[in-house]
Each structure stands twice: as structure tokens, then as C-alpha cells.
Amino acid sequence: METRKTSFAYDYAAMEAYALQYWGPDTSDYNQDFRTYDNDCTNFMSQIVLAGGWTEVGAYPINDRTSNSNWWYNSLGTFATTYTWAGAHNWYFFAQQESQRTSHIDNVYKALVTDIIQVDWSPTGAPDGTLDHTMIVTDRDPGDDGLAVELYLTYHTSNQKNKSLSRIKAERPNTIWYAHRT
């Protein structure tokens, strides 16, 4: 396993530990301090980065929960939580553009442990321009050239721990990949 060097920005060990503790396999294994969604992958990712030191932006009822510049969770219900907390597409805009808490990685195989991978896939198999799913890298087989030989991803919705990127690619060949450095 290859992990990133220490950073002063976020607690990457806490992010990885959270992902591996609360990935599932059943929803009863999730962190009970947070509600679950039918498509829970981005809710889970928000919990992971929160555990790693991300601070929430805005608050209910003062700020607009539909704005991609806000990111918070509220236990009152989904009506009091931002779209960016649990929506993959909205989370992308918050993380990459609005807050710049992540940076673009030009090749998914450059991702390190605790980097975030998002995908555009649709039920018909053809990408449609909307990000549909969010995962975290929880293990990595490094190669000689700095690119990973294999990445292992952990996520909610279908509750997977350390599922290989090559297996996901085989199951979803028509996918557009978005990699974020956290």
C-alpha cells in the first residue's frame, strides 16, 4: 500500500480509517449519527472528508442549501442539508470550483489513498454529463512510473470495500472518470 506524504491540510489517516470503518457491508454498519440516502455514496464521502478536517460552509436556515458554494449537514432532515453534501454532481462543483478543496488529477491512476474518484455513468451505460457516483481510494498498488498498477475503491450505495478499479471498469466500460486530489 502506498499512501500520501504527511500534509498540514487534512488528516488523511482519519479519512481512510473512517471509510474503512463505516463502509458497510450493511446499512446498520454506517455511522448512525448521519441519515442515509437511497444513493448514499456522496453522503458517505462528505462524512469521510468531514472526519478528515473539512469544515462546513454555511448553515441552515441562513444560507441557500441549493447553492454549490455551501456544504453542510443538518440532522433535522434533507430539507436542511445542502445538495452538495449528498449529490455527486453538486459535490464536484463545491469541491473543485467553489471551495477549491480538491484539485483535478489528469489520470485516475495517479490517485493516492484518500483521493476521491467520481464517475459519469448512466443506467443505459452511456455517460450523460452528470456525475453519478463518488468513491474514495482506500488502497493502491504502486507502479514504477508513479502511476498505480491498481486502485482499490470504497463506497456506499452498493457498499464496497477495496473494490478494484479494473473490476469497476470491466463492469462499466463506458464511464468518464473524475479524479480529485484531496
Image (cartoon, rainbow, N blue to C red):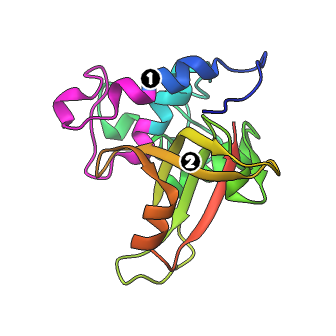
Left or right for 143, reference 113: right
Nearer to us in this view, 40 or 4: 4
Left or right for 20, reference 139: left
User: Is residue 66 at least partly visible in the picture?
Assistant: no
Image disc number at residue 91 = 2
Number of marks in the rendered image? 2
Callout 1, which amino acid? Tyr
Compared with 125, 24 (above or below) is above
Q: What residue is shown at x 49% (from left), y 77% (from top)?
A: 173
Q: Report x, y in % for residue 119.
A: 53, 63
Confirm whether the magenta stretch covers residue 111.
no
Q: What residue is shown at x 54% (from left), y 17% (from top)?
A: 14
Which residue is tagged 1? 18
Label 1 secondary element: helix
Left or right for 47, reference 150: left
In this view, the residue farthest toward the right is 145
Q: Report x, y in % for residue 144.
A: 79, 48
Q: Which residues are magenta?
A: 19-44
Instruction: Name the image quarter holding the N terminus.
Output: top right
Instruction: Name the image quarter holding the C terminus.
Output: top right
Compared with 125, 4 (above or below) is above
Image disc number at residue 145 = none
Compared with 125, 114 (above or below) is above
Q: What residue is shown at x 50% (from left), y 62% (from top)?
A: 166
Callout 2, which amino acid? Trp
